[in-house]
Image: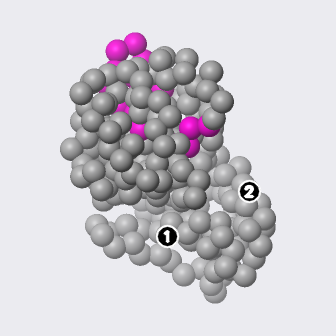
Amino acid sequence: MEKISVAIVDDQNLFRQSLALLINSIDNLNLITDSSGGQELLDTLKVLDTRVDVAVIDMDMPGMNGIQLNKLLHELYPETRVIILSVHVNEALISKMINAGAASYLAKNCDKDELITAINTVHEKGFYFNNEALTAIRNGTNHKNHAHDLLNPIPVALTKREKQLLLLICKEYNNAEIAAELFLSVRTVEGHRNNLLIKTNCRNTAGLVLFAIKYGVFEVHFNQVIIPDFKNE
């Protein structure tokens, strides 16, 4: 089994070194580099002969903060998925970073098992949103215009098939699982997914989930996800 390549960026030495030990202790994870800052990571990536699948980055760092680093990683290394690991867990910042393309946002005091789950899920599904992140996304919706949004919930024209695909993405289905569910080829699913990204102007799968929540394609109620039925459209 091919291992998931991971990079860590955090300026707190003890925390970063402890996190590196944790990553190295997991059989299917491969720590490529641990850096004390954003520029150090970018300099390292320039000379690496392997890709980084998942970057776990802090928000508060000297020189280049997590917001700036997340932006540069998306521009320079779009194949690298970003997990934010921060002491700051306010809803506005969580929503901001997910809007900016982060695949997951976790508190630094999260359980180690959740971090490992997030890395695996982000690598396989493209995103991992826990209850805190889902609540931030939900509360980030403009409630003032909620009634208007319900009249025209999706600002772009999606086909029935694209809606079905989007709902399955929100349920954390990967391409192969979507293909099996909808009786399509994986290549066809990839084509529909790419069309969704273009139509919605989203950066990645996490952005598609954010789009779906924002425009009412599915609604989150605490631990329950309620998904509308588009079968009869």
Q: Is residue 57 left or right of residue 5?
A: left
Which mark, residue 171?
1
Q: Residue at the spot x=47%, y=35% of the render?
A: 7
Which mark, residue 180?
none
Relative vertical location of residue 101 with respect to residue 63 in this rendering, above or below = below
- Density class for disc 1 (Cα within 10 Å; few <14, some 14-19, many ≥20) is some
Q: How many marks?
A: 2
Q: CA distance from mark 1 to mark 2?
A: 19 Å
Color encoding of the figure: one colour
Range of the magenta residues? 51-69
Asked if residue 67 is among those painted magenta in the image, a careful observer would answer: yes
Residue 11, x across and y down, in percent? 32, 22
Q: Is residue 187 left or right of residue 231?
A: right
| Residue closer to the observer: 114 or 73 | 114
Label 2 belongs to which residue? Answer: 195
Residue 90, x across and y down, in percent? 26, 41
Considering the image in quadrants, where does the C terminus appear?
bottom right
Residue 93, x across and y down, in percent? 34, 37
Q: Residue furthest bottom?
A: 232
Q: What's under tag 1, amino acid-wise?
A: Lys
Considering the image in quadrants, where does the N terminus appear?
bottom right
- Density class for disc 2 (Cα within 10 Å; few <14, some 14-19, many ≥20) is some
Q: Residue at the spot x=24%, y=49% of the render?
A: 110
Asked if residue 211 is among those painted magenta in the image, a careful observer would answer: no
